[in-house]
Image (cartoon, helix red, strand yellow):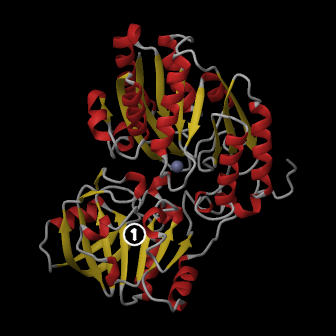
Amino acid sequence: MKILIGNFGHEANTFASKDASFEEFTRMGYYKGEELIPHYRGKPSYIGGMIKSAEEEGVEVIPTVDVLNAAPTLSMSCVNKVMDDIISVIKKNKDDIDGICFGLHGAGVARGIDDLESYVLKKIKEIVGNDIPIVSTLDLHANISNEMVELSDGLFGVKEYPHIDTYEAGYLAFKTLVKILKGDLKTKMAVKHIPILLPLSAGFTQREPLLSINKHIKEYVKENDLIDASLFHGFPYADVEFASTSIVVVGDENSNVEKAAGELAEYVWKERYGFIPEINSPAEAMNKAENFEGEGYIVINESSDNPGGGTPGDGTFLLREMLKRNREGTVFGFIYDIESLEEIHKHKIGEKIDLKLGGKTEKIHGEPIEIKDAIICNLSDGLAICTTPMLKGLPMNFKKAARIKVGNVDIILTGDRGQTLDDRPFLITGADLNDYRYVGLKSANHFRGYFQDKAAMIIPTDPPGIMSADLSVFEYKKVTMPKFPLNKDIEF
Ligand SMILES: [Zn+2]
């Protein structure tokens, strides 16, 4: 038995002003063919889970490509390039492929294609035909279209945010496909859309109401002998018709997947008031931080400029407020600014430099900050190994980094966009978090995988941005309305 594997995951922020090129989309890694196997074997990732299952089952895998990133709408040349790489492997192995286990994200959008996942599945089916079973893994932030469900023999979502269970999703998808191929199983699937747009910053699954919802879904799956059920939070920053929260249920041919999806959706709907996010301006967040009396460091996370949701990562609102306060023991980790970083790297540690920092990509994220006489404290190659459970053991490449000091504020700069996931960006620039009191960073929730138990307090801040938690600021053109919480009088 031979199974084709791969991953083409794109989370589209369609509110960005420019499309993403192939280079922009693949900047965090693009793995091809056999190199996928040693890179992901045993590592927390969709492909890692697929490999584990393949090795247990004694099934041969045919690897294609792996790419996963949040970015603006993809250019068609980018999509064509990725698809060419996938298709060429399929064509070469066409007669040997028994099944396909392919990772997708669920919120992919390209110029002219609002449902990238269905596009990919259709392109694959054009070559292998309709008789080869295809299952897919999906991110928790997937917007599920009806077509996606029709084209697939099983969609397996991540249940946790931070996404610590990609390995489990890959493993279950692959296991299910093997059962189908052995003739032991015929799958059925149903989707139920829930009229909710769920901002990312309200989606932390290790607290209520999502803790109880996930527990309930898990028990329901067990009691009703289903294969899997996923609550997809959806991605409200992709303006497509079917952007929404939803439930997808996978069962065998005897199961009533429609009834299950309906009942689970109803359960989630009742908890909808728990999905309204905490919204603080940077000034409000800093006031709360300054009034906190407990020991330890306080994290202020700028969720509206979370590059993990396709934002620029060079927004200046929170950093500007921290510089204004100039509190002792402040560190900002990190801001993306390749121009400033290259300038800094021309100097030596201890020298002083003037910079126009950040604010160079999207106007809505704030103007550049004029900085005079910043002291260069550290220069780094920007290489690290991730320690947060979601990506533990996988390499991170910030494409150089540096730490500068402006008054009492330490600022870490990187040469690539990214969200802060753990203490690595601080450590590689010689900063020990325990030496600080106020820690500013950019992320909506993934940072919690590392910081939830370590920070004395976490305060989200939501200045203007293309990933604001306040969804009323967006001019939706395509999303089917009405949706909670934009409209609170919806009946479901
Ligand atoms: Zn996600």
User: Is 263 or 286 nearer to us in this picture?
Assistant: 263
Q: Would residue 112 be visible to someone looking at this image?
A: no
> Residue, x 25% and y 73% (percent of image)?
403
| Count of numbered tags | 1
> Residue, x 40% and y 63% (percent of image)?
420
- In this view, 296 is above or below 450: below
Q: Check disc 1 and report the residue beneath it.
A: 368
- Image coords of residue 401 (percent x, y): 25, 64
- In this view, 363 is above or below 426: above
> Residue, x 33% and y 40% (percent of image)?
40
Q: Amino acid at mark 1?
A: Pro
User: Is 327 or 130 nearer to us in this picture?
Assistant: 130
Residue furthest top as drawn = 95
> Residue, x 34% and y 46% (percent of image)?
28
Q: Is mark 1 within 8 Å of ligand 1?
A: no
Viewport quadrant of the N terminus: top left
Q: Quadrant of residue 345?
A: bottom left
Q: Check disc 1: other Cα within 10 Å, few if <14, some if 14-19, many if 20+.
A: some
Residue furthest left as drawn = 348
- Image coords of residue 176 (percent x, y): 54, 28
Q: Would residue 28 be visible to someone looking at this image?
A: yes
- In this view, 341 is above or below 244: below
- Image coords of residue 36 (percent x, y): 31, 34
SS at circle 1? loop
- Image coords of residue 304 (percent x, y): 54, 63
411 sits left or right of 301 in the view: left
User: Is 70 or 20 nearer to us in this picture?
Assistant: 70
